[in-house]
Every structure is written in C-alpha cells, then in structure tokens.
Image (cartoon, coloured by chain):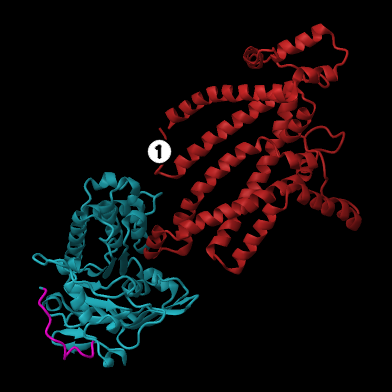
Chain colours: A cyan, B red
Amino acid sequence: MTEKVLEIRDLRVTFDTPSGPLEAVRGIDLDVEAGELLGVVGESGSGKSVTFLATMGLLPVRARVTGSVLLAGEQLIGASNKYMRSVRGRLLSMIFQDPLSALNPVHRIGDQISEMLQSHQNLSSRDAAKRAIELLDIVGIPQPSDRAGQYPHEFSGGMRQRVIIAIAIANNPKVLIADEPTTALDVTVQAQILEVIERVQERFGTAVVLITHDLGVIARVADRVNVMYAGRNVEQGTIDSLFDHPSHPYTRGLLASLPRPGKQRLKPITGFPPNMLNPPSGCAFHTRCEFAADICKGELPNLVSFGDLQTACVRARELPKSENFA
Amino acid sequence: MLRYILRRLAWSVPTLLLVTFLVYIALRVGTDPVESYKRVNPRASRAKIQQYIDINGLDPNFVQGYFKWLKNFITGEWAPSIKGRREVWPALKDAMANTLRLGTAATVVGIFFGLIAGVLAALRPGGRRDVFINTSAFVGISIPPFISAILLQLLFAVYWQKWFGASLFPTSGVYPAGHTGFDLFLMLKFMALPTIIVAIQIIATYSRYMRSSLLDVLNSDYMRTARSKGISERRILIKHGMRNALIPVVTIAALDVGSIVGGLIITENIFAYPGMGLYFLKSFGEGDFPLLMPWMVVIVASILLFNLIADISYAWLDPRIRLE
C-alpha cells in the first residue's frame, strides 16, 4: 500500500451565522496518497473548498473546526499558528480559483515567487530570484527572466494561473491543493493549466488534490475521485470504477448530466441543493434521489465498501445496475 | 515620466490664465475695485484714481483690463494695497509661510494619527476598538471647528488659568505682541491649539478613508494568497495590505494639501492667526483688489501643482497606472 500523506478523519466545520450554526462540513474522511492526483467533486456549497481551507488553517477564526487532519503523521487541527505558518507553503500549498485577483497587483511577479521561497528556505535574494525564474520556466512561461520583472497586470489569465502554480510549488510541497484552478479560464487555457499541474505532479512527485465541479476535468487527470454532497462524502474510488459503474445515485446523476457525443438531451438532477442551516435528516440527498425510500431519512449513511468503490448509500445493494459512463 | 511632468506643467499655463481671467471677472463684478478705492480715499484726485486703474488693469473692457493686469503682475509692478498703501508681496509671503507652517503641522499630525486609527479599526471590524474609533471619528467630523476651537480655548486658556494660575496655550496670534525674531518654542506654543483643531478634522476623515480602504484590501484574494504562503501576519499586513490600501489615501491626501494652502479660514479667524485664510477674509471684506488677485493666483497655482503631485504619486504607487 502506498504512503498516505494526508489523512482527514471525521472533519467537521461549523460557522456561526445570524440564523444559527451552519455545519458546512459534516464528518469527512479522506486520504491523499503520496504522488497521486485526487479529484474532489461536488456542487457549490458541498463543503469541498471549506474542507481544504480547514486543512490549510485558512478559515476565519469564527469557524469551528473539529476532527483530525494528519499531514505526514503530524496533527494540523488545533496546531499552533506558528506551526501552521511553517506548514503552509512548505508542506501544503493551495491554488485558488481566480488568477486575476490572486496575485498582488503592486509587486513584481519574481518578487512574489521569491517571497514564498525565502519564507521557508534560507536563500539569499539573488538565489531566490534565480530560482523564481527557473520556476517560471517549469510552469511554461516563455522568457522567464524578462517576465519575472513584470507586474501581474501584464500577464493574461492563463499566464497568471501558471505564476500562481509556480508560487505554490516553489518549496516542493507534499500536497498541492488546487481549488477550481481552471474554472475562471477559457477552455483552451484550462487544458494547458491541467497539463502544467500534471507535469508538476509527475516531475516532483507532488500529491495533488483537484477540487472542481467539473467531472470532465476529473476524468482527464485524476487517479481517484471523491464525490461530496452536503458536507459529506458520498462516494469514492478510482476514476475507472467510478465512471464504469457509479453506485451512489448522486454520482449517477452527476455523470448522467454530463454532455456526451451522441446524447440528445442532458439529464439534470432535479431539485436544489439542501439548505445547510437545516439539512434533511438521514442521507441529505434523499430529497432529490429517484431511488429514495423511507430508510434513507433515518441515519446518516457512512462510506461502505461496495465492489471497488466506497459508497455512502444504504440502498446501494438494492439499486439497479448503473449505466456505464466510461 | 519626465516628459509627462513637463507636459502637465506646460498645460498648467493656459489653465492658470483661464482661471485667473475668470477670477478677475468675478472680483470686478463682485467687489467693484474702483468704488472700494474711492471709499477708502474719498479725497483722491482724478489722476490718482486713473493711476490706480492703470496699474491694476481696471479698464472698462474686461479683456483689455485683464491683459494689462497680467503684464503688470508678471513684470512685478504690483499695486500697493488700497488700505494703508502697503506692499502686497511681503504680506502675501508672510501669510503663505504662516499657513504652510500650520497646514503642514496639522496635516502631518492628522494623517499620521488618522492612518494609525484607521488601521487599528480595520484589523478587527465590528470589534470594540473599531466601534470606539468610528464613533470618535463621527464626533470629530460632526463638531465644526468654530465649536471645538472655542471649547479648547476655554479649557486650555480660561479654565487652565483659573485652576493652575497660568494658561497652557495662548489663544491668538503667532507670537506675543511686540515680539521680534524667531523663537521655535514660543511659535510651537502659539501654533498648538489651531494645529489640534485642524488635526482633529484630518484624523477623523483619514481614519475613515484608511479603514475602508484597508478593509477592501484585507478581503481581497491576494491577501489569501499571501496567507497561504505561510508568511507572518505582520509582513502580510505591511507588505501586502498597507502597500495597496495606501494608494487611494495618498492620492486624496495630495489633493487635500493643495486646498489647505487656501488657508484654514475658520480656524485662522478664531485664533487671529495671520495666514492665507485671514488674509483673504480681511482683503475681501475691504474689497482690496490689489491684495486679492495675487492671493487667487497662488491658490490656483497650488491646486494645479498638488493635482499633478497626486497623479504622480498615484502612478508611482500603483504599477498599473502609467503616465504618458
């Protein structure tokens, strides 16, 4: 068995809102193995970003986080600010969605990369600047030594996302968390950015967590997939088995809603995501599930091995065999 | 950049001409300078009046008159004031120096404390400290200087004298009557109250500017990027937060300084502080055209100059702005 770099156990995140506590993440278990590319899918509000912001220690202080997150065996939940600072950018890095606003407009690109290097490595300014140029080259920015002296507004969206990747991988982290890195980009640029991420993963052996709501993106690059719904895991497994025979009704719905060649109409999942201030009892998906039965309203289902998948559905065994989406 | 500055300076010449022409018309229509002269010198001979009209460019035709005034102004043939027949330049120069001293002191003190208060408020929005600073700022903006000035005069002069035997700060002038020469300590003592009055207003406004500007920045994505780098909060605040938050504030500050040269009319009047504001108030009250026109030129020029400084500092702070 491969080494686990990140082990998340029973992670819960609650925000106090004026209308009462809102549990955005309701007990997530998730492993990231060394060097793999794990896809995390779910719709907006499913808790996928919050899970990893909690892992990074980047949630606002008013968020209550419980459970356990082990990074290479070290506990991150409840760790000191000082320790979390030493983890962020060194062992764990994060790329955010909107490359247009994620870089500081008043500092040069090279300096923004050097800052990341110098905050975790004992490097002279000159060495850091040199290394920054190498990193720009690695993420595929032409004329890196000229570009390092430029400001973010002189870069296109795709180029800025490459810069952000360069910053994130500067200290060769164990895990790179990419939160919807391609959502704000053109389709052609999306493909290029995914290639850069894959290249980094292969070249440095970095484990990548790719958070997205786009199953098409997952299908292209991920080794394993973790499907989230209403702050819970509903299904996880390898990319092949998940597309081959999805078991959880939500995963089936997601896959059925994807456009595919020869398909005339898209089949949407009916209904709306639940209100997390007052989530449905039992399986949160039962309100929208075509296979729902009374038993689904009872207890929160946990992930159970089902074939080569792990599925959180009490009726998984009774359901008709799914269409093959591979 | 240099070309941009030179071009802007070149452009300021026609602007200055146009604005002074408008001011010239406004003053002539508003104060009737010839009548003012006759009022002060009721027994002036016809020749004297004609001489006054000539040197001030007060021809019946405004355009001809303006250019006559302009020629005399540029060649340094300034008319003496109507009242007292004093030279205008020394009076104007003293007023400028006094106002600059008061304005600079108040601006430096005001912006310094204003920015600190704004940052402290923005760091914990909604907290007790934020509420306190916001409330104080509101009180500071709401109390007009003619009220706060009188309150401070009462406290530091009248009551202080009653309680401790001597007043802490004098309430008017630059030096005690009859004083000659330069005395820094005495000067600071006389400047203290008016500086505080003006600084209160500046602190109140700039703490609000700084708070909202920094709040915007603190919520931006690049601050999250900075945090995800694992650098210290202090460095995040100074290098990423302040650097961005100061851009709009510095620009506004440069524009504000330009208008301070116009004098702090109310404060100077209350403290009988002989700056540009008091100069204007007196000469306008007496319709003293020879005193008023050069004052106007100085005001217009300084506003143009500080507008240019605002633009330059904006481009200097924000790499997205390039001047050409």
In what element is the residue under mark 1? loop
| Residue positioned most to the top | B47
On the image, the x and y values in percent for residue B151 come to 80, 53
Residue receiving disc 1: B322
Magenta span has A205? no
* Left or right of residue B301, residue B149 in this image: right
The one of A240 and B191 positioned closer to us in this rendering: A240
Q: Quick check: A231 above or below A208?
A: below
Magenta span has A324? yes
The one of A297 and B285 positioned closer to us in this rendering: A297
- What residue lies at 83% left-to-right and 32% top-to-bottom? B180
Residue bounds of the magenta highlight? A313-325
- What residue lies at 30% left-to-right and 82% top-to-bottom? A287
Magenta stretch: dominant SS? Answer: loop
Q: Quick check: A207 above or below B171?
A: below
On the image, the x and y values in percent for residue A1 come to 16, 83
Task: Report whether residue A151 is seen.
Answer: no
Badge 1 crowding class, 10 Å Cα cut-off, few under 14, some 14 to 19, many 20 or more, is few
